Image: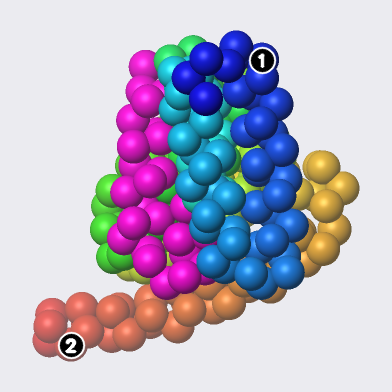
Amino acid sequence: MLGLPTTEHRAIVELGVLVTGFLSYRNRPDETLGVAQRTLQVAQAADEPRLVSAASFPLSSALHMMGRTAAATETLYRASGLLRGRDDLEPDIRVLRQHGLSLMHTGRFEEGVEVLTRALTACREQGNRFEEAHVLRGLSIVLELLGRTGEAADALTGALKLYKALGLDSEADAVRKRLGKLRRSAQSAAPTSGRRRTSARR
């Protein structure tokens, strides 16, 4: 493997990513994991950060399929670490987004917000509105879990505007429904706190 030129490494990684996607779709977790691990080894042999990050995403997904959430998070943590301070983040925004959500699944909400905010900045710098909508949607979930309902609603509103602008009607409908629930939840909590403040003044 180490003797392969980078172009061949890239071709093998691209094929590996396609195969892992197919195996994942057919719900064959053991085979998915095996192919994903070999794909990452090829990417690492190329010593090219963007290739490693591309191979890390399917490996993380395979680990998630098997319930190995901590290992999945660690895989994406290493991949996103390769990208810090780089100017070529556009192909790797998906890795950052998935890393942020993986941190959320392990209860590391504040870290998840930090990583998703990095992904959001990269989306806006690159003008990638499609990924920006997905990142905002994921960010809203983590913010809601932190109790930051207003910020969560703002993020979800931004995602809704982007989905509508992109013509992604099904995504927009799903976000609109969740945004309605989020706003109702925030409104139902507001009068209670107001009554408490009134009672305290008396």
- Residue 88 point in image, percent of width and height: 54, 16
Who's the residue at 54% across and 66% down the image? 30
The amino acid beneath tag 1 is Thr
Crowd class of label 2 (few under 14; some 14 to 19; many from 20; radius 10 Å)? few
Who's the residue at 55% across and 39% down the image? 39
126 part of magenta stretch: no
Q: Is residue 89 left or right of residue 110?
A: right
Residue linked to disc 1: 7
Name which quarter of the figure residue 44 lies in: top left
Nearest to the eye among marks 2 and 1: give it.
1
Residue linked to disc 2: 199
* Label ID, residue 16: none
Quadrant location of the C terminus in the rendered image: bottom left
The amino acid beneath tag 2 is Ser
How many numbered circles are shown? Answer: 2
Colour mode? rainbow
* Image position of 190 with respect to 82: above or below: below
Mark 2 vs 1: CB contact within 8 A: no
Task: State the residue in front, 7 or 182.
Answer: 7
- Residue 48 point in image, percent of width and height: 48, 18
Q: CA distance from mark 2 to mark 1?
A: 71 Å
- Residue 159 point in image, percent of width and height: 64, 50
Residues drawn in magenta: 60-85
Q: Is residue 175 left or right of residue 59?
A: right
**Residue 80 visible here:** yes
Who's the residue at 46% across and 23% down the image? 45
Dominant SS of magenta comes to helix
Task: State the residue in front, 81 or 55.
Answer: 55
